[in-house]
Image (cartoon, helix red, strand yellow):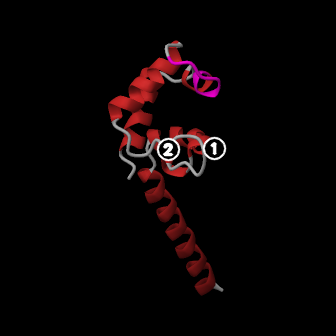
Amino acid sequence: MLHVLKYMVLISCSAVAINTSHAADITRGTMLSNSCAACHGTDGKSPGEIPSINGKSFEFISQALHDFREGKRKATVMGRHASGYSDDEITAIAEFFSGQP
């Protein structure tokens, strides 16, 4: 019985270590990009009519989000999304998508 208990503790500790190391890989930009996936596709690779944003330059993505947020670039959905982002969040999103192949 003690052997089984030791094994169960070992498995539990391994699972925690795996989850912790994976969590360390998740950046703020990664988390924020999840809301973009519904329209722009996973990692910014759009499966349809919506433009792909993976690999676009940091400057392009950042400027587009600022323009959407400030109403300089007209849109229905993007204006609403961008209006909720701070400058730091826009930077994190632009860094994430500009780094995607």
Q: Residues within 10 Å of mark 1 (few under 14, many from 20)?
A: few
Instruction: Place residue 5 in its image quadrant.
Output: bottom right
Horizontal and vertical percent position of residue 65: 47, 25
x%, y% of residue 91? Answer: 39, 30
- The relative height of residue 9 versus residue 52 in the rendered view (above or below) is below
Task: Give the secondary structure at mark 1.
Answer: helix
The vertical placement of 58 against 82, above or below, is below
Instruction: Identify the residue at image location x=48%, y=64%.
Output: 18
Q: Number of callouts in the render?
A: 2
Q: Amino acid at mark 2?
A: Ser
Residue type, label 1: Ala
Q: Which residue is mark 1?
A: 38
4 displayed left or right of 51? right
Q: Position of residue 99 (x, y in %)?
A: 35, 46
Q: Residue at x 39, y 49 (%)?
A: 100
What is the quadrant of the N terminus in the image?
A: bottom right
Label placed on residue 80: none
Q: CA distance from mark 1 to mark 2?
A: 12 Å
Q: Secondary structure at mark 2?
A: loop
First of labels 1, 2 by sequence position: 1
Q: Quadrant of residue 9?
A: bottom right
Q: Kindly identify which residue carries mark 2.
A: 52
Query: Along the line of sight, which residue is nearer the eye, 57 or 9?
Result: 57
Query: Which residues make up the magenta segment?
Result: 73-79
Decide: few, some or many residues near mark 2? Use Cα within 10 Å; few <14, some 14-19, many ≥20: some
Task: Indicate left or right for 10 with 100 as reference.
Answer: right
* Residue 15: % across, % down: 54, 67
Rendered image quadrant of residue 2: bottom right
Q: Residue furthest front?
A: 49
